[in-house]
Image: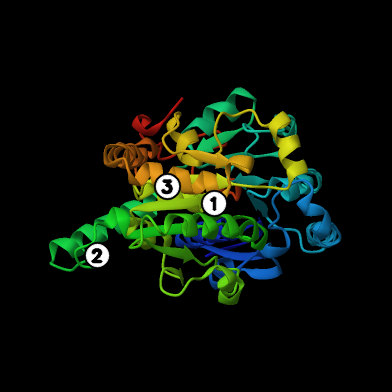
Amino acid sequence: MRRVRVLIVAGEASSDAHGAGLLRALRGRGLAVEAYGIGGEALAEAGMELLASYRDLAVVGLFEVFARLPRILGLLRRIRREFAHRPPDLFLPIDAPDFNLRLLAGAARRGVPVVYFIAPQLWAWRSGRVRTLQAHLRELLVLFPFEEAWFRERGVPVHYVGHPLVDAIRERSAAAASCAGAGRIVAEPPAGVPAEVSAGLFLPGSRAGEVGRHMPILAAAAERLRPHHPRLRWTIRRAPALPARFYAPWLRDDWIRLSDAPIFELAGAAGITVAASGTASFEAALTGTPLIVVYRVHPLTWVLARRLVRVPWVAMANLASGRGIVPELLQGACSPEGVAAEIERLLGDPAGRGAMRRALHGLRERFGPPGAYARAAERVAVHLGAGGEERGGCAAPLSGDGRDD
């Protein structure tokens, strides 16, 4: 079994999970991978040596990052020292562009091939950073069909591998259907209570700052709705990085509770979900749950973002479909009044909820066949000299049916 050394930097919980899936897929190809770098519990469980936690990098916003800047700069120096003193056979940055893009030139100067997993969202803002990818990247592995064409047009070596979340949702949906077919009830609202007025889900974000900005608004919106929908019960999904006590100010007896259950299960049982923009909102969308996407940032970050962002939507469900399937309440629109009004509108529109469910279920078909981690591992193995096709090849190509070129 060939031994290889891979340096991984994953900047948030979803990147940590995807990194772990890719690491396991690489080992499934017969590679003895010594992995080390920045990540979290998932990568550690997959056998990676943690040099630091992704929580030190998990900051959203231009102004929010200032408080963490000394720690972030220290981690940049730490990773650069690793390139010098324990050089890897390959550098695998995962998302986190504000951190990872600063490491590419140094890796390339030392002759370390760089394969970037999960594209920086340069198509949304600060697209000039694409020059860094053009200059230093061996290959970019992207999760969304539209990203492949965007990066290829700009001279970046890119390969579309599919989305692991779509794979996971398909597997869980098949398992749930099998259980239901065997007579087991997967999820059921209280007796005699329609699901659309009984089960609501809040996904306020994966970082403390996101939860702290969103939960006061979401809890206040729930309070506004309670006189008109007394049977409506809300569940807050706890972020893995945050303790349960962090959510205590927003829990309400038996009608706003906290859960560690998988997003797939919670969203699949919910009549309506309100989610902060991000990976969790996309996972919820893939279940077909009627969805509202919200987001707030520091006011100065918002002012700058409005000048820089070049896309019509922020929700990945809308970007992936190319149309506004789910409503987005951003910044000023993300208020107790705005969120409550949008929830009320959806609750009063069964036909609209049904149309949204159908559109969201259709998203899965845009991503081609399953096997995202396996395809990503195959491309990484190429650059480790461990089989597969030459650079730029398209081993095990995805079906064109799922592309949005």
User: Which amino acid lies under the numbered mark 3 shown in the image of this protein?
Assistant: Ile
Q: Disc 3 versus disc 2: distance between alpha carbons?
A: 21 Å
Label 1: which residue?
386
Left or right position of 143 against 267: right
- 171, above or below 235, in the image: above
Earlier-in-chain disc, 1 versus 3? 3
How many neighbours does mark 1 have within 10 angstroms: few (below 14), some (14-19), or many (20 or more)? Answer: some
Name the residue: 56% across, 28% down. Answer: 312
Nearer the observer: mark 1 or 3; the answer is 3
Earlier-in-chain disc, 1 versus 2? 2
Q: Are marks 1 and 3 in contact (CB under 8 Å)?
A: no
Between 169 and 10, the one lying in front of the other is 169
- 402, above or below 261, in the image: above
Left or right position of 218 against 54: left
Nearer the observer: mark 3 or 2; the answer is 3
Earlier-in-chain disc, 3 versus 2? 2
Residue 52 percent across, percent down from the top left: 72, 68
The image quadrant that residue 38 belongs to is bottom right
Instruction: Using the image, tell me which numbered label, if any, was put on residue 188.
Output: 2
User: Which amino acid lies under the numbered mark 1 shown in the image of this protein?
Assistant: Ala
The image quadrant that residue 403 belongs to is top left
Left or right position of 291 against 348: right
User: Which amino acid lies under the numbered mark 2 shown in the image of this protein?
Assistant: Glu
What secondary structure is marked by label 2?
A: loop
Nearer the observer: mark 1 or 2; the answer is 2
Between 64 and 30, the one lying in front of the other is 64
Q: Are marks 1 and 2 in contact (CB under 8 Å)?
A: no
Q: How many marks?
A: 3
Q: Disc 1 versus disc 2: distance between alpha carbons?
A: 48 Å
Label 3: which residue?
343
Q: Are marks 3 and 2 in contact (CB under 8 Å)?
A: no
